[in-house]
Image: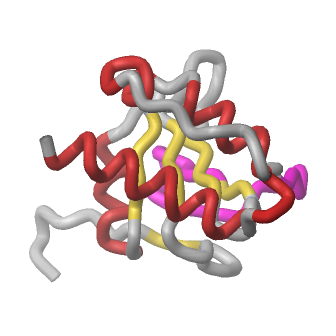
Amino acid sequence: MKDDQIQFRILFRSPKYPVIVIAEDDIWPAYNIKELGTVCYISEPTENSDTIKVIDSSGEEFWYLPEQVALTPGFMQRKWTKKNIIELYNQSETAKETNVQYSLTSLSSKRLSTVVADICNLLNQNNDQ
């Protein structure tokens, strides 16, 4: 490892990919540990927070601690629902800029992991443009 590289650490257990990173300016997708480390490191926490929240494909919340450069499972054991994740996306800057909303209909027929993957793909498409 080079001297100027920062070691991104995952404490206790890894998230299930893909994940959604909730930063101050928008939400971002990450498909592996390298992308997650990069997105977390360059992101700023949301207002009134010292952590950056990460939602994995099982709906579990993780917290990135910038001062420790570490990701840890959220201590509150909060599980995100399909509806909460969709609303997060629909209110994001990306959804507003692209004018693409994720439908809240037929949620019972969709798996939570599918919803997270779909939203990550929508976010990724916007980043590629």
Q: Position of residue 68 (x, y in %)?
A: 50, 55
Q: Position of residue 42 (x, y in %)?
A: 29, 42
What range of the chain is rendered magenta? 63-79
- Figure check: 87 above or below 82: above
Q: Nearer the viewer, residue 16 or 109?
A: 109
Q: Is residue 117 left or right of residue 25?
A: right
Q: Residue at x 82, y 50 (%)?
A: 81
- Figure check: 37 above or below 54: below
Q: Position of residue 69 (x, y in %)?
A: 45, 57
Q: Position of residue 64 (x, y in %)?
A: 55, 52
* Residue 28 visible within the image: yes
Query: What quarter of the picture does the C terminus occupy?
Result: top left
Query: What quarter of the picture does the N terminus occupy?
Result: bottom left
* Residue 40 visible within the image: no
- Figure check: 4 above or below 84: below
Q: How many tags in the picture?
A: 0
Q: Where, by quadrant of the figure, is residue 57 drawn? A: bottom right
Q: Is residue 69 magenta?
A: yes
Q: Is residue 125 left or right of residue 45?
A: left
Q: Is residue 64 magenta?
A: yes
Q: Residue at x 36, y 62 (%)?
A: 37
Q: Residue at x 74, y 68 (%)?
A: 111
Q: Nearer the viewer, residue 2 or 77?
A: 77
